[in-house]
Image (tube, rainbow, N blue to C red):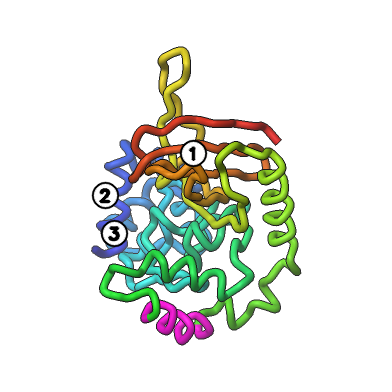
Amino acid sequence: MNTKDVLYKLRTENGLSQDELARKVFVTRQAVSRWENGETVPNTETLKLLSKVFDVSINTLLGSPQKLICQCCGMPLEDEIIGRNKDGSLNEEYCKWCYADGTYTYSDMDELIEVCASNMAGEGFTAEQARKYLKESLPKLNYWKRYEELGDGGEFDLFKKQLIDEINALNVEGMPKLENLNALVGKFVNIEYPLPSGIKVRFLDDGTTYLGNQLESEFGGDRCFGIIANMDFILICTYEAEGKNPELVMYKKR
C-alpha cells in the first residue's frame, strides 16, 4: 500500500473525518486531503504525530518500505511487538522484549542467546543450531555494536538482581529458587485468575513489558510456577500446561 492508501484506511477505520485528523496533527483539512490524494506526503514531524494518533510505526505509514528487525535480538518487527520509548512513542529499532519504556532489557548477549534459542528450537532449528546462528548474527546488530554507548552501566541488571532477591525472600512453598528474570510481554502472559468471590480478573496490561519466569514446582506433577513482576508489584501463580487452570498464589505491591 502507498502512504495515501494507508492514511485513508487508518483514518476511516478510526472513525475520523479529515477535519478531525487535521486537528489532531495540527494541519489543515486540505493537507490531509492532499495526503490521501497522493499529492504530498506528511513531513517527518507530522509522521511522528500520526504514528502516535494511530499507534502504528512510521514504516507502516510509509507503506512498509523496510523490513524492520529488532536491533538487539534480530526478530522481525511488526507494529504489535515494537518497543516503546519513555513517552509512549514506538521505537522502530527494537521489540517489546528487548526494549520497554525506554529501557534496554538485555545486557548479556549469552543470556539473550539462551532465551532466544529455547524459543527457536523446534521451529526448523535445533537448540544448538539456533545458538550458532545467534552467536554469528547478534554481534552484527546495532545494539550490540553500540553497546558501550547504549548500555546503562548495569543499572537495569542491578534492579533485576534486587527483584530476584526480593522474590526469593518470599519463600513461597514449593517454588524453586529464582535465578533469572526475562522480559515478557503482557499479551502473552495475561492470565485470567478466579478469585474466592467467584469473579475472574486479569492483573496485567497486554501492551506492557514485564519481567518474569516459569519454574517447575518442587512438588512434582504437571503444575508450574509463574512469576511476573515490575517496579510496582510481584505476582506469583501456578498453572498447568499452556496456562490452563491457573491459581493466584500471591499479588504483592512493592
Residue drawn at (49%, 41%) of the image: 219
Horizontally, residue 190 falls left or right of residue 65, namely right
Q: Quadrant of residue 149?
A: bottom right
Q: Is residue 68 visible?
A: yes
Please tell me which residue lies in front, 7 or 98.
98
Segment tinted magenta in the rendering: 129-140
Provide the major secondary structure of the magenta segment. Answer: helix
**For mark 1, what is the residue?**
205
Q: Is label 3 or label 2 in front?
A: 2
* First of labels 3, 1 by sequence position: 3
Q: In the rendered view, would you say 197 is above or below 210?
A: above
- Report x, y in % for residue 194: 42, 23
Horizontally, residue 181 falls left or right of residue 197, namely right
Q: Amino acid at mark 2?
A: Lys
Tell me if label 3 and label 1 are in contact, CB under 8 Å: no
Residue drawn at (36%, 81%) of the image: 129
Residue drawn at (46%, 37%) of the image: 238
**For mark 3, what is the residue?**
4
Quadrant in which the N terminus is drawn: bottom left
Crowding around mark 3 (Cα neighbors within 10 Å: few <14, some 14 to 19, many 20+) is: many
Circle count: 3
